[in-house]
Image (spheres, grey):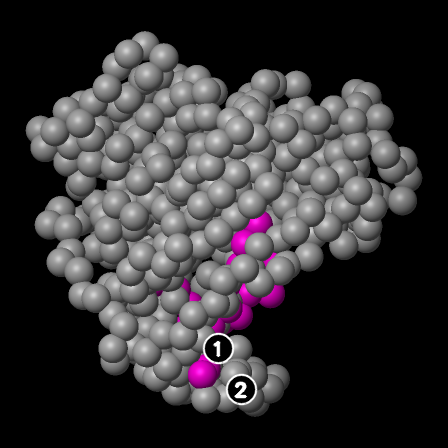
Amino acid sequence: MRSVILFLVIIAISQACDKRSEFDRFFNNETMRVDFNFYGNANSEDIRLLNITKEPFWGGSISNFTDKLDYGEYKFEILDSKTNELIYSQGFSTLFEEWQTTLEADTIFKEFSQSILFPEPKSSVDLKIYSRMQDGNFEEIFSTSIDPTKDIINKKLAGYPVLKILDNGDPATHLDIVLLAEGYTIDEMGKFEKDAKRLTDYMFEYEPYKSNKDKVNIWLVKSESEQSGTDIPGENIYKKTALNSNFYTFGSERYLMTEDFLTVRNVASLVPYDDICILVNSEKYGGGGIYNYYAITSVDHALSEEVFIHEFGHSFAGLGDEYYNSSTAYNDFYNLEIEPWQPNLTTLINFDVKWSSMVNDSVPIPTPREIQYEDVVGAYEGGGYVNKGMYSPYMDCRMKTNVAKGFCPVCQESILKMIQEKTK
């Protein structure tokens, strides 16, 4: 038995070394960042390249280069220019594509900043960006060649202090979460530290974060603001803050976001990270979260902890909203004729690719919202902002309400899968 275990350990070490060697063949252990703007309206989109810059820390995996999950409204690919070999890819979503589903987008054109990150390549690469079409398939919308010896602009890093409040090891094999201060003055940084610890401690009370705490590093960037709080346009309140956040995004009072994504990236670049969370020094209820973009929440409302892990579910694990009876700014957010990419929503068009294997044979599909199925995985009609044609896996879940006990088994499995992807 000991010889078998030793043999398996040797194989695992050998595979890890092979992956490290492959990373070193293509990349340096630093980050390349490509900034661009999305420009368009409800029916069009264009990409306008801004800058290609270098950042000092690569926080991602050094063994898992290509995205296998197929999440996001967009994805990008990095190909070696000489061989055309795919060496890196990642899916992502944007505030722009959410805006495209609003009434405003029917009448005007607008621009939104965006950026993508990948390990700094050692030689020339080709970047391709794809958009997910209405039928669910990706279509190329932008491409450019990048020569890392010529095209990079080195930016001066922001001068904010950083603090690591949870240290479990090498960023290459751990999930690194960076929390940014928003609306905290320099005299309120002690409060920021306490707020960050309170919210992350709450996250680790729930599975699967609880059982995987040893795989997580948490960083703080003390990005002080000139004034305390954030913009509340509906109340004619405007503050000078580090990240330019505001409530009433797209006219929705509780939707707290910032369109200044490039500043968010600048501040986050002080540490290695996989996911960005913004803590807003406000007692007003609200937040937001977009896959591979950022999560954001106010910190002093009675439900701030619940909002924090809900929004992190969006930004980190690509989970969709399971509620269906609350007003939103979106129109026809999902195409009900295809399967959504979000792992916790289904139209039953192709349920086999979702969580059908987790449903007991005795549970009817669709599953009625009746008390006998209260703690049973099924397919309950209602989710994704609509009450007909979309189905969610549980009667209640943290992706549906703030009173749910935690994440349902399907969401837990999805979060765990993402943790595993980030820590390989």
Residue 273 seen anywhere in this rendered image of the structure:
yes
294 displayed left or right of 139: left
Of the residues shown, which amino acid type is indicated by label 2? Ile
Write down the region rendered in magenta.
59-81
Q: Image quarter for residue 195?
A: top left
Q: Position of residue 189 (x, y in %)?
A: 15, 33
Q: Which residue matches tag 2?
A: 11
Q: Which residue matches tag 1?
A: 79
Judge by depth and name the residue closer to the eye, 33 or 221: 33
How many residues crowd mark 1 within 10 Å: few (<14), some (14–19), many (20+)? many
Q: Image quarter for residue 259?
A: top left
Identity of the residue drawn at 43% across and 17% down: 253
Identity of the residue drawn at 33% across and 17% down: 233
Q: Which quadrant is the N terminus positioned in?
A: bottom right
Of the residues shown, which amino acid type is indicated by label 1? Leu
Q: Is residue 82 above or below residue 189?
A: below
Q: Position of residue 321 (x, y in %)?
A: 60, 33
Q: Is residue 296 magenta?
A: no
Identity of the residue drawn at 35% across and 50% down: 177
- Residue placed farthest to the top in the image? 235
Q: Position of residue 325 (x, y in %)?
A: 66, 19
C-alpha distance separating marks 1 and 2: 29 Å
Q: Could you tell which of marks 1 and 2 lies nearer the N-terminus?
A: 2
How many residues crowd mark 2 within 10 Å: few (<14), some (14–19), many (20+)? few
Residue depth check, mark 1 versus mark 2: number of the one nearer the observer = 1
231 displayed left or right of 83: left
Q: What secondary structure prevails in the magenta region? A: loop
Identity of the residue drawn at 68% across and 38% down: 334
191 displayed left or right of 206: left
Q: Position of residue 415 (x, y in %)?
A: 55, 49
Q: Image quarter for residue 384?
A: top right
Residue 102 seen anywhere in this rendered image of the structure:
no
